[in-house]
Amino acid sequence: MLVLLALCLVGFAQPSPLPSKHLKPDRIQATSDNEDTWLSVPEIITKYGYPCEEYHITTPDNYILTLHRIPHGKNSKVTPSEVAYLQHGILSSSADWIISGPSKGLAYVLADEGYDVWMGNARGNKLSRNHTYLNPNTSDEFWDFSWHEIGYYDLPAMIDFVLEKTNKDSLFHIGHSQGTTTFYVMMSMRPDYNAKVKAHFSLAPIGFMNHMTSPLMHIIAFWQKPMGLLLNLIGIREFLPSNDFMSLGGNILCGDDSLTQVLCTNALFAICGFSPKEMNGTLLPIMSGHTPAGASTKQFLHYAQEINSGHFRRYDYGMVGNLQKYGSIWAPDYDLKKITAPVYIHYSNNDWLSGKTDVDRLYSGLANVQGKFLVAEDSFNHLDYVFGIRARELVYNKVISLMKRH
């Protein structure tokens, strides 16, 4: 089993031959009826009549990140006074918030509701796969990060840039999946950022994970230690990088007219929970053009450690490594009591990655949690928060109503 998993990782973890902005869309366009599959995030946004701005910032440890902004709604010319910052999950990008289309994608919904919307991109995804001196295609050092570094370096850098650009003191933060994990990392490690967040909204929160039920993550967790050793030995650092071959294959296999589309939906269900009521099959080829967006293998190994340990803590380097890095044989837990910004948790019964027991434990550990809201649909899964047919009705409208309290 370990060898099989390693071979799969080797097959999917080769460096992208071209950066995403240089993909050759004609190879993808020929298999897709929807141009949103191969358009860039700014091109999709402006196609639907919304304004879009793109920025590039450098973190203190020299990673170059991409930010996207929708400064106001489609039918407005005035930049709103309130700022909403959105942070994607693992293997994702800012595209998550817009590919469902106007009136459905959260970024559009918030812009039309009167918010200045910003979307971050974490290091290592196809839009932030850059560094001032490290080459992601050849440097192991580039990929030596987990979601801890995203929370400690990337998220504060992007928030500081947004606040400076908008001349604001604070903003709303909305995270999905890993986008919630990195928020909790930032706030517990750098508590001064509590003052910069007006309120945080956790969609499918992930902190504790030892009660999650995803078969894929159980496999990764079971083989975590030997897999980590093997991946280091053979030099595999990048997991599921985005490239034109994967986008092309996704369009062929997952298109509306493809007999194999059901395999694509079932593959997603097997990871995140079965949710046929919320699955929009038409979105699958578009999703395949933007997801997976790439990540480090260390991000997945860190989550595997969370599953095995039952803790929400920093990366475990083993007894010797921990002594060198932390001065203790154990990796330190994140102190949730340092998170004093208002937090609203949104969870669902059919989320195989964010289990109710783990959500309850997170809820009880936070210092200023304002509410815990169960999605009123039993089949709602982990990905439905961004791609679900009724995500606006079941989640976004509630989030916006809570935002208006502040």
Image: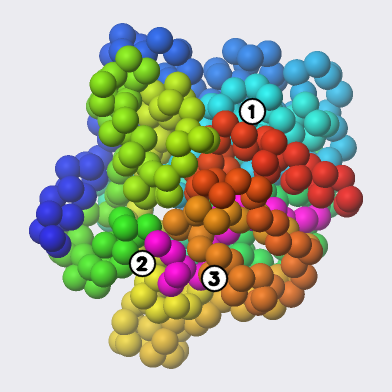
Does the magenta-highlighted stretch encompass residue 67?
no
Q: Residue furthest left?
A: 3
Find residue 257 and name its label.
Answer: none
Q: Callout 1: helix, strand or loop?
A: loop
Q: Residues within 10 Å of mark 3 (few under 14, many from 20)?
A: some
Dot placed on the residue nearer the N-terminal end, 2 or 1: 1
Say which of 16 and 366 sits in front.
Answer: 366
Residue 291 percent location from the top left of the image: 40, 35
Residue 2 percent location from the top left of the image: 14, 62
Asked if residue 164 shows in the view, the reply is: no
- Mark-to-mark CA distance, 3 and 1: 30 Å
How many tags in the picture? 3
Magenta residues (range) = 197-213
At a point 75% along the width and 39% down the height, the residue shown is 397
Q: Callout 3: helix, strand or loop?
A: helix
Q: Residues within 10 Å of mark 2 (few under 14, many from 20)?
A: many
Asked if residue 265 shows in the view, the reply is: yes
Q: What residue does disc 1 label? A: 104
Q: Are marks 3 and 2 in contact (CB under 8 Å)?
A: no
Quarter in which the N terminus is drawn: bottom left
Q: What residue does disc 3 label? A: 357
Dot placed on the residue nearer the N-terminal end, 3 or 1: 1
Using the rendered view, name the quadrant where residue 217 is placed.
bottom left
- Rendered position, 74 above or below 223: above
Q: What residue does disc 2 label? A: 304
Name the front one of labels 2 and 1: 1
Q: Callout 2: helix, strand or loop?
A: helix
Q: What's under tag 2, amino acid-wise?
A: Ala
Does the magenta-highlighted stretch encompass residue 199?
yes
Q: What's under tag 3, amino acid-wise?
A: Thr
